[in-house]
Amino acid sequence: MFNIVIFGAPGSGKGTQSDRLIERYGLHHISTGEVLRDHIARGTDLGKTADSYISKGQLIPDDLMIRVLEHVLDSNPDKTAAGVIFDGFPRTIEQARALKDMLARRGSELHAVVGLEVPEDELVRRMVERGRLTGRADDTPETIKNRLKVYHASTAPLRDYYVGEGKYHAIDGNGDVDAITESIHRSLCERVPGLSGINN
Ligand code: AP5
Ligand code: MG
């Protein structure tokens, strides 16, 4: 199993690059934001709870989010996938420790963290534009501001955590989408033995 976390601020391109990486490496994609938005759309109890946090740009509490992730991991129907790309999880040090334990209990580990680094004005521009085009509920100016504040306070410290674990791959996430995919590929191939053999 080959497991990657795609990491970055709101609007940094985690979903966009995940779509490309799952195709390239045959990975299964788990986006916690998409899981929660699906629950909101279906009106489940989890969806109602999640909506009360997401609409304010706050994080879902760690204990709940960890249980949700564990459930999603266990109900992964894609048993033939080469591994998993985690998009939007972990977002706190507590979640990072939980992910490490979860993977270890399944005889696996996290191989790499791809960190998409994008200037703040570009993040805001992308989210405002997406809000205009798609109406995504948390892409309003006030919620975007809070999502970025929460990112800096709770999620950004994970960068140093994963640098310390020797897993962090800093990627310039600004510019052409295809060029960013290529730089992720090059960076992963340099440090993850066997990856270039999975696919090219
Ligand atoms: P989540 O859905 O994960 O949202 P996010 O982290 O805020 O990130 P986005 O999905 O907005 O952006 P992205 O990085 O995926 O970029 P994208 O490719 O879409 O989480 C939503 C909420 O759920 C959280 O706020 C929280 O409340 C809750 N939640 C989720 N996980 C949680 C967890 N683990 N713990 C607690 N709470 C959790 O790109 C953005 C836009 O830019 C798109 O329109 C795209 O087309 C465009 N774009 C992409 N790349 C480029 C490029 N290179 N140049 C120009 N435009 C680009
Ligand atoms: Mg996303």
Image (cartoon, grey):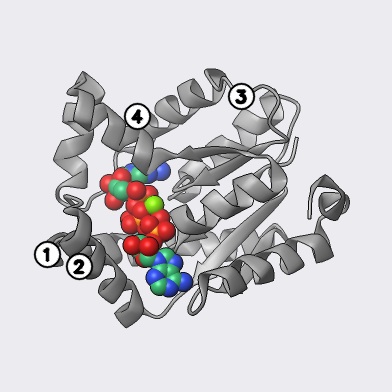
Q: Nearer the viewer, residue 42 or 179?
A: 179
Q: Earlier in the sequence, mark 4 or mark 1?
A: 4
Q: Is residue 115 visible?
A: yes
- Pointer 4 residue: 64
Q: Earlier in the sequence, mark 3 or mark 2?
A: 3
Looking at the image, residue 79 lies above or below residue 139: above
Disc 4 versus disc 1: nearer the observer: 1
Looking at the image, residue 37 lies above or below residue 142: above
Q: Residue at x 41, y 27 (%)?
A: 68
Callout 1 touching callout 3 (CB < 8 Å)? no
- Amino acid type of the residue that numbered disc 1 sits on in the rendered structure: Glu
Disc 3 versus disc 4: nearer the observer: 3
Gap between marks 3 and 4 measured at Cα? 24 Å
Considering the numbered disc 1 on the image, is that residue within a helix, a strand or a loop? helix
Disc 1 versus disc 3: nearer the observer: 3
**Residue 47 spot, x, y in % from top left:** 22, 28
Q: Earlier in the sequence, mark 2 or mark 4?
A: 4
**Residue 141 spot, x, y in % from top left:** 13, 67
Q: Is residue 10 visible?
A: no
Ligand 1 within 8 Å of the CB at mark 1: no
Q: Earlier in the sequence, mark 3 or mark 4?
A: 4
- Pointer 3 residue: 78
Callout 3 touching callout 2 (CB < 8 Å)? no
**Residue 178 spot, x, y in % from top left:** 58, 69
- Amino acid type of the residue that numbered disc 3 sits on in the rendered structure: Asp
- Pointer 1 residue: 142
- Pointer 2 residue: 145
